[in-house]
Image (spheres, rainbow, N blue to C red):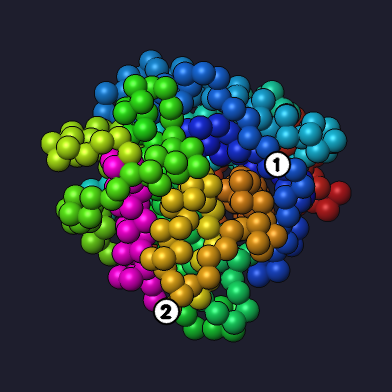
């Protein structure tokens, strides 16, 4: 099947779109990216999303964004289809994560609500392609964290034949999947959010530059600054970092408000912009390393980096040191486009849901049992697709 995967991550810096070819069924599922791209948001959209996804967000703005994002996601899908040199009629499904706005977690780690917006009806109508969306809530409904959804696909596609791997995503929030080798038929995988990825760094850059910059390009600020080790050590006492997995978090915990508070704390210590960014970068690295030290079920020999954070040399250098002797790789090193991996995830989830197969593992999210995930919005191809899939026509 040809399936388009779509996602805008926690950083809300654009829509990743990937046209994928997916066949077979677990454990013999094959998935490859045919074409991928990033569809940028218009000026001001990132800030609107981040402002709306706070306790101060307003219902009319959320409703407006829900529909506007539907149009933008549809544009992204059509754009990647055109770039691949095929027609929308050639595509079977779209799998859309949408845009995460709220992920409510209690102090005990229970997810009580999760909200991902982007109107699937608009995507299906504009493209004519049956669209699967809103995957997280089904896992939450059976007691799971609803995240990280990438972990099940890591389990299906990225296990090494002989040694343990960690698949480390560094988006706005960082998450890890610890994978036993294929030769190990008894060990279970483990996945959870490790804490902040780029969210605190990006928010701090935005605040300190008075809106002129949105991220630390090439890690230049961090590399020019000096880490305040004592200040970072105080941050490492955060309750989330101690909580046992499975666990998940979001910008509600590690986002703009926290960055603003940390900047106020840092300025009382006479820390300048570069030192603040260097210290927040060190904090991110140390939260990831702490997760490995506390919770990895086995020594990790390879770490596969993904997400925007892998483009930050300061983060990568810190992880090489903190996670040694593990070998640090990227998805590109194992044949997957790192920039489109998460879009591939939602294409695979759409494929599995369409075939009435589960898309989660209880050991990864804490769910009571496996479930078929997502909601189906019929497109113009819906009847033909049913006949093709279920009637053998």
The 10 Å Cα crowd at callout 1, few under 14, some 14 to 19, many 20 or more, is many
Q: Which secondary structure is most common in the magenta stretch?
A: helix
Q: Position of residue 164 (x, y in %)?
A: 51, 76
Residue at image point 60% right, 22% down? 71
The correct choice, above or below, for 295 with respect to 141 in the image is: below
Q: Is residue 308 above or below residue 208?
A: below
Q: Quadrant of residue 35?
A: top right
Question: Bounds of the magenta span?
Answer: 275-297
Which residue is the site of mark 1?
36
Residue 347: x and y in percent read 65, 47
Whether residue 224 can be seen here: yes
Residue 18 badge: none
At numbered mark 2, what does the secondary structure look like: helix, strand or loop?
A: loop
Closer to the camera, 106 or 379?
106
The answer to whether any part of residue 114 appears in the image is no
In this view of the protein, which residue sits in the foreground, 124 or 194? 194
- Pick out the residue farthest to the left: 268
Find the distance from the CA under tag 2 to the CA under tag 1. Answer: 34 Å
Is residue 284 located in the magenta-colored stretch of the structure? yes
**Residue at point 59% right, 71% down?**
159
In the picture, measured across the screen, residue 77 lies left or right of residue 301, that is right
> Residue 329 or 297: which is nearer the viewer?
329
Instruction: Work out whether mark 2 precedes mark 1 in sequence or the reverse, and give the earlier one.
Output: 1
Query: Percent from the top left, x then y, of residue 66?
Result: 48, 24
Q: Do the residues bearing badges 2 and 1 touch, measured as CB atoms within 8 Å? A: no
Any magenta on residue 210? no
Q: Element at badge 1?
A: strand
Q: Which mark is residue 298?
A: 2
* Residue 354 x, y percent position in the rendering: 65, 49
Q: Is residue 325 above or below residue 307?
A: below
Q: Is residue 161 above or below residue 288?
A: below
């Amino acid at each position: 099947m040809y399936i388009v995967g779509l996602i805008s991550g926690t950083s809300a810096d654009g829509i990743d779109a990937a046209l994928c070819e997916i066949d077979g069924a677990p454990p013999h599922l094959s998935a490859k990216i045919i074409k991928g791209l990033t569809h940028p948001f218009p000026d001001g959209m990132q800030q609107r999303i981040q402002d709306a996804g706070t306790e101060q967000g307003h219902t009319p703005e959320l409703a407006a964004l829900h529909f506007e994002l539907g149009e933008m996601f549809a544009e992204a899908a059509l754009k990647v289809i055109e770039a691949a040199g095929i027609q929308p009629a050639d595509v079977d499904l779209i799998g859309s994560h949408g845009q995460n706005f709220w992920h409510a977690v209690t102090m005990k780690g229970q997810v009580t609500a999760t909200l991902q917006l982007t109107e699937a009806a608009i995507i299906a109508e504009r493209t004519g392609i049956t669209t699967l969306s809103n995957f997280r809530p089904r896992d939450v409904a059976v007691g799971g964290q609803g995240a990280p959804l990438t972990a099940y696909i890591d389990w299906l596609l990225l296990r090494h034949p002989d040694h343990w791997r960690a698949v480390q995503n560094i988006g706005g929030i960082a998450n890890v999947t610890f994978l036993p080798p294929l030769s190990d038929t008894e060990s279970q995988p483990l996945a959870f959010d490790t804490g902040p990825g780029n969210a605190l760094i990006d928010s701090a850059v935005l605040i300190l530059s008075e809106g002129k910059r949105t991220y630390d390009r090439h890690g230049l600020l961090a590399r020019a600054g000096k880490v305040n080790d004592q200040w970072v050590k105080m941050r490492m006492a955060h309750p989330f970092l101690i909580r046992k997995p499975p666990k998940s978090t979001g910008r509600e915990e590690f986002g703009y408000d926290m960055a603003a508070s940390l900047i106020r704390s840092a300025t009382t210590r006479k820390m300048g912009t570069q030192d603040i960014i260097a210290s927040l970068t060190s904090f991110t690295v140390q939260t990831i390393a702490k997760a490995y030290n506390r919770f990895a079920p086995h020594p990790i020999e390879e770490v596969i980096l993904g997400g925007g954070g892998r483009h930050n040399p300061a983060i990568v250098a810190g992880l090489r040191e903190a996670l040694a002797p593990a070998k640090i790789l990227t998805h590109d090193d194992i044949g997957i486009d790192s920039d489109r991996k998460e879009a591939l995830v939602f294409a695979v989830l759409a494929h599995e849901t369409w075939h009435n197969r589960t898309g989660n593992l209880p050991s990864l999210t804490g769910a009571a049992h496996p479930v078929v995930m997502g909601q189906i919005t019929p497109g113009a191809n819906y009847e033909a697709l049913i006949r093709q899939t279920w009637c053998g026509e």
